[in-house]
Image: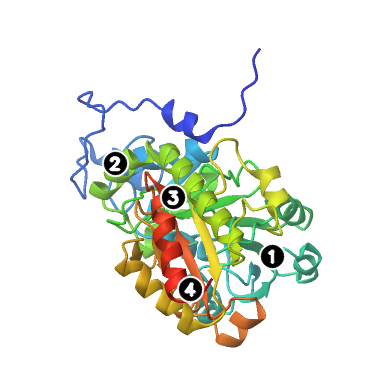
Amino acid sequence: MMKHKFDPATRIQDMLLFDEFGGVNPAITDSSTFTFLDPDTMTETFQGHTEGCFLYSRHWNPSNKFLADALASMEGTESAWVTASGMSAITCSILQLCKAGDHLITSVTTYGGTFAFLRNYLPKFNIEVSFVDITDLAGVEKEIRPNTRLIYTESITNPLLQVSDIPALADLAKRNGLLLLVDNTFSPLMISPALLGADIVVYSMTKFINGKNDCVAGAICGSADFVNALSNVNDGTAMLLGPVLDPLRSSAILKNLHTLHVRMKQHSSNAMYVALELESLGLKVRYPGLSDHPQHELMQSIMNDGYGYGGMVTLDLIEAAKSNEFMRLMQMEGVGYLAVSLGYFKTLFSNPGKSTSSEVPEEVQRRIGLSEGLVRFSIGLDNDISRSFTKMKECLIRLNLI
Ligand code: PLP
């Protein structure tokens, strides 16, 4: 028999969804509640016994189920759950897994909101957190304590673009009875964390997965037991905190998911072009596709074929004032938008230390190598990236940066 490699985009393509009326896009469920023909079925559904019955949209609804099933297929997990934001996917997963007195280990480099939740919010629940350099496996192991419950990381960290060694972290977690929770927001399709050993994979779908920057959404992919636990009416964190995704949005995201592979390839090839050009100008650029990236070989060993190294590139201009002038000029010249977020069809750029990682205290930023002059790019889908790069280069020349 011919053996095929796991290909997340083909898994999405192979899903055939049939709704009641045969629409090629499943009908949107415009209801918060669902009727029952028999009160006994309602009782059984609340007790979690009736498969395929929908009771209330904060619990499940058909539109969210279609999207969740597609994401589980893409990720190779048994199940998935969709949420109203990436942050709620992260916070619900962690609060579902950890109780007062537990301890978790996280990469110190994460999205700033995640950092703030772990550092400023979890102490309210007496959950301890160790912040580590996730590329230092011995350092991660040293932090394991009897009450450690999980290891948290991002496949490609925001904003420093370190690549996490997911197989090694999964092995470490398994040997010590811990769980590995991975945020794969920067690398959908490119990396399949669950196949590399992660127990739970979370996404901000606001970014590449939706790709339009017209909504905020998140996802949690994991075992059926975990998703059932999250949605349990008595003690499920997602059910009780209630960050439900609106079905109108989930149906739009499902359609966008079907073009994700085309978009990721274009983001990646454009980003590779920009990274190589910036590097050839002698600038301090970081991109997992460059051979001098510290985890370039690791990235090659864990990535799926055909999607490239992603759309995120950083350029370190050392001084905040220089990065500000550069970003102001690039926006005026039409390179893209000075805006946070990522995965959009146009190029976006921002200074993480002053925006999406401003929650990270300055002394920690300096310690982890987050320079005050760092510019983070989410490279767009430009049809002619050389033209866009020429504009970028002209900005650098005008500001005497090259
Ligand atoms: N994870 C990463 C890596 C992010 O960059 C972000 C957002 O900025 C989030 C999670 C949070 O997602 P959301 O803004 O959808 O809540």
Residue 339 at least partly seen: no
Q: Which residue was labeled with disc 3? A: 386
* Ligand 1 closer than 8 Å to label 4 CB: no
Report how far apart the C-alphas of labels 2 and 1 lie in the structure: 37 Å
| Marked residue nearer the N-terminal end (2 or 1) | 2
Report how far apart the C-alphas of labels 2 and 3 lie in the structure: 40 Å
* Ligand 1 closer than 8 Å to label 1 CB: no
Q: Amino acid at mark 3?
A: Ser
| Marked residue nearer the N-terminal end (1 or 4) | 1
Q: Which residue was labeled with disc 2? A: 63
The picture quadrant where one finds residue 378 is: bottom left
Q: Residue at x 51, y 74 (%)?
A: 401
Viewer-proximal residue among 174 and 212? 212
Proximity of marks 1 and 3: CB atoms separated by less than 8 Å:
no
Q: Which residue was labeled with disc 4? A: 352
As helix, strand or loop, the secondary structure at mark 1 comes to loop
As helix, strand or loop, the secondary structure at mark 2 comes to helix
Which residue lies most toward the top here? Answer: 1
Q: Residue at x 46, y 70 (%)?
A: 397
Q: Is residue 284 left or right of residue 39?
A: right
